[in-house]
Image (cartoon, rainbow, N blue to C red):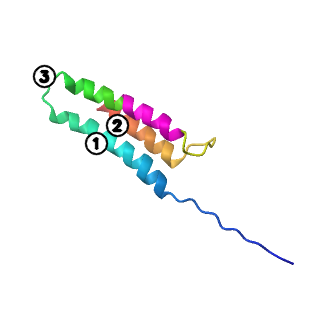
Amino acid sequence: RLTVKIRLSRQSEYYVWKIFLGSILLVIMCICTFMLEVSEPDRMMGTITVFLALISFLFVAGTSIPKVAYQTKLDNFMNFSFFIVFFI
């Protein structure tokens, strides 16, 4: 009798460096718009631009992650990033 055991594990470093870090940098860029003066017209445009960039980043990142029918930690993190940028 021959028994073969295969151990599989995900290498999460790819997702951490490509998706989490990219999303965090976009949120930080949105927070940095508060360094501009209130009367600066580019302040609101910068926030809207970062929000649109975050949406397009989600679609691009969605092509490289596996499709599942439930919410993952990555989905929750991206939703949290949307809420942060929306409230800013």
**Alpha carbon of mark 2 to alpha carbon of mark 3: how far?**
22 Å
Dot 1 crowding, Cα within 10 Å, few <14, some 14–19, many 20+: few
**Alpha carbon of mark 2 to alpha carbon of mark 1: how far?**
10 Å
Residue marked by disc 2: 84
Taking the spot 46% from the left edge, 58% from the top edge, the residue there is 13
* Numbered label attached to residue 28: 1
In the image, what residue type sits under mark 2? Answer: Ile
Quick check: is 57 in the magenta stretch? yes
Residue 8 placed where, x, y %? 64, 63
Quick check: is 17 in the magenta stretch? no
Number of callouts: 3
* Numbered label attached to residue 39: 3
- Where does the magenta region start and end? 52-62
Disc 2 or disc 1, which is closer to the eye? 1
Residue at the right extreme, as displayed: 1
Side (left or right) of 1 relative to 65: right
Q: Quadrant of the C terminus?
A: top left
Residue 79 placed where, x, y %? 45, 38
Q: Quadrant of residue 68?
A: top right
N-terminal label among 3 and 1: 1
In the image, what residue type sits under mark 1? Answer: Ile
Looking at the picture, does residue 10 appear above or below residue 47? below
Looking at the picture, does residue 23 appear above or below residue 47? below
